[in-house]
Amino acid sequence: MARKKIISDEIREEIIARVDAFNEKKAKQAQPSGMTNLLRRLGVVPATPPGKTVGSYVPCFRGAFLYLDRIGWNGRPSEICRLKWTGDMENWEFAIYRHSRNFYDPNEWMFPGSGHVDGTVEGAMRAGMEAYPK
């Protein structure tokens, strides 16, 4: 018997569209520097995965959670934050990833960018950009 998805396909499609729009807007604002391009040509900094740029968010769904990871300079996704579905697209529960302890902390509110957390996916991504700059 198949389990019912907590976050429906329609909501997932909406989230993916929002993440893609955010990534598109940020990509236009932050082009790689000449030094980054030089380091890529020399093989010091690997190329990013096809269709992804450094700093792009990658959404991942597991149960009631939306994990927002971001592509780093090494071309791999890195944990940024986790949102918990509450049934309202504008009122997600937020948890920042604490790399120092390797877990998502819903009680941590003293971090750069915490003022952007407003219950939306976009607010979480803005907070993550400030908490974990490239």
Image (tube, rainbow, N blue to C red):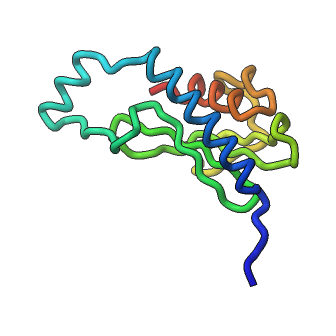
> What is the residue that sits farthest to the bottom in this orientation?
1
The residue at the point 72 percent across, 62 percent down is 63
- Where residue 99 appears, as percent x and y from the top left, is 55, 43
Q: Nearer the viewer, residue 93 or 132?
A: 93
Is 38 on the left or on the right of 70, as rendered?
A: left
The residue at the point 78 percent across, 70 percent down is 4
Is 52 rendered above or below residue 28? below
Q: How many marks?
A: 0
Say which quarter of the image contains residue 77.
Answer: top left
Say which quarter of the image contains residue 30.
Answer: top left
Is 17 rendered above or below residue 64? above
Is 90 on the left or on the right of 100, as rendered?
A: right
- Where residue 125 appears, as percent x and y from the top left, is 63, 31
> What is the residue that sits farthest to the left in this orientation?
42
The residue at the point 67 percent across, 41 percent down is 15
- Where residue 132 appears, as percent x and y from the top left, is 54, 29
Q: Nearer the viewer, residue 12 or 131?
A: 12
- Where residue 28 appears, as percent x and y from the top left, is 44, 17
Q: Pick the quarter of the image with the C terminus.
A: top left
Q: Pick the quarter of the image with the N terminus.
A: bottom right
Say which quarter of the image contains residue 92.
Answer: top right
The residue at the point 58 percent across, 29 percent down is 21
